[in-house]
Amino acid sequence: MKVYNTLSRKKEDFIPLEEGKVKMYVCGPTVYNLIHIGNARPMIVFDTVRRYMEYKGYEVNFVSNFTDVDDKIIKKAVEEGVSAQEISSRYIEECKKDMAGMNVKSATFHPLATQEIEGMLEMISTLIDKGFAYKAADGTVYFRTRKFEEYGKLSHKNLDDLQAGHREIKVTGDEKEDPLDFVLWKPKKDGEPYWESPWCQGRPGWHIECSVMAKKYLGDEIDIHAGGEDLVFPHHENEIAQSEACNGKIFSRYWLHNGFLNIDHKKMSKSLGNFFTVREIGEKYDLQVLRFFMLSAHYRSPLNFSGELMEAAKNGLERILNAAENLEHLKSSSKLELMTSKEEALWQESSVFAEKFEAAMDDDFNTADACSAVFELVKFCNTSVSEESSQEFLGKLYGRMTQLCDILGILLEKKEIILDEEIEGLIAERQAARKEKNFARADEIRELLLEQGIILEDTREGVKWKRA
Ligand code: AMP
Ligand code: ZN
């Protein structure tokens, strides 16, 4: 299996630290709002990487954090007049619902930064003891960037170029020894959450959180560290500096980064306001369509979001689900139990699609080509089966489709999703039924909607509805 390593800028053979095991850390979202579909890209692509590794027989220890202390969370808490913790736990729950909708498996551990402060204090103390960090007069602790000689090895940046960039933006009153130094611990501001520390009452910097959580749940050395490409610098570069300076070992062997999800060829982001939440997309499409759309491109390529591409993904997915449904249907009415010799030969022939699928995934998780192999298998199934086919043959083909689609995280059962306009139509019908005193029909419609997860509320301003 070859994986592209940002560190070497090359595809390399994947060799785990320990045979048969993979230790993988993926930087998770900052939880201050519903996640957008850009945030969903690393979730989907690295979940697929994990599934493929598991298919190959590896035991994968998959850790992905939630950043639950951050300026944006605090700002939102102030706006709503609630605690930062209330905001983060609310959006962690919402994020987990979205992940389930996209069929993203739960991580082995989902650590929260605020629960790991102890480990952060320890790592920062070690870095100070080793001379890699220092406390400034106001209690801020900085990492001494130039002391870590390999700084820049991931992002391929040169310290002097970085220095030149920083000189222009140097802020007066900065207490850093060097503009390149970054924060490990910072003093609290009024009204902010804080923790006691040997340096000041305060909170951790963002980068130290991931170094500590990866160390605690996976160890000093891990196989894969992943995230979106915007995390290469400074987040991952700083994580390497902290972890390697503290532990004296190579932190992660392979660094994987997904390309951006764009809209009108610009990065989709909260700050630019050009985003769709996963929740919004879920109102129009089954989230499996979103997943399939994400996997239609290579994970490192930029991917432009558009209605047309989503429609294409929807049609493609339907073709797969229809083929699976057809196999099941034929199997339930088939009279022949065992494969004929002609079917034996066809079954052997169909292994070529699984081989193509694996070859694509072995080549740095080329899901685009892997999807093409699934489409070829679909076509093969559609043309090789009939009412005369045996149950064994139909079952085996269904099994092969399930196996490949499972790796992509695509479920073969069809899920009907109810669109906004259909809901509005049923509500209007229910109102009309009530007017005619046909309460039985009105109740039936309420039940029908409830089965689809739609909750109705009769208010003075009329009927309101929401998705459960
Ligand atoms: P954040 O909550 O901003 O820290 O982002 C969580 C994860 O989503 C990180 O791995 C980001 O790199 C990734 N991410 C954010 N926006 C996008 C985007 N438009 N396309 C792909 N990945 C993104
Ligand atoms: Zn991180």
Image (cartoon, rainbow, N blue to C red):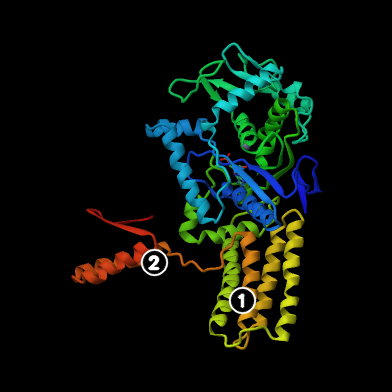
The amino acid at mark 2 is: Glu
Disc marking residue 422: 2
- The answer to which image quadrant residue 53 occupies is bottom right
| Residue 85 image-quadrant placement | top left
Question: Is residue 112 shown above or below 257?
Answer: above
x and y, in percent, of residue 129 in the image: 68, 17
Q: Is residue 295 left or right of residue 248?
A: left
Kindly identify the residue that appears in the image at 57 percent across and 82 percent down: 330
Of the residues under marks 2 and 1, which one precedes in the sequence? 1
Q: Amino acid at mark 1?
A: Gly
The image quadrant where one finds ligand 1 is: top right
In this rendered view, identify the residue nearer to me: 155 or 1.
1
Give the distance between the C-alpha atoms of the residues marked 2 and 1, in whole angstroms. 36 Å
Q: Relative to residue 108, is residue 327 depicted above or below?
A: below
Q: Which residue is label 1 attached to?
A: 395
Label 2 neighbour load within 10 Å: few <14, some 14-19, many 20+? few
On the question of residue 281 being in view, the answer is yes
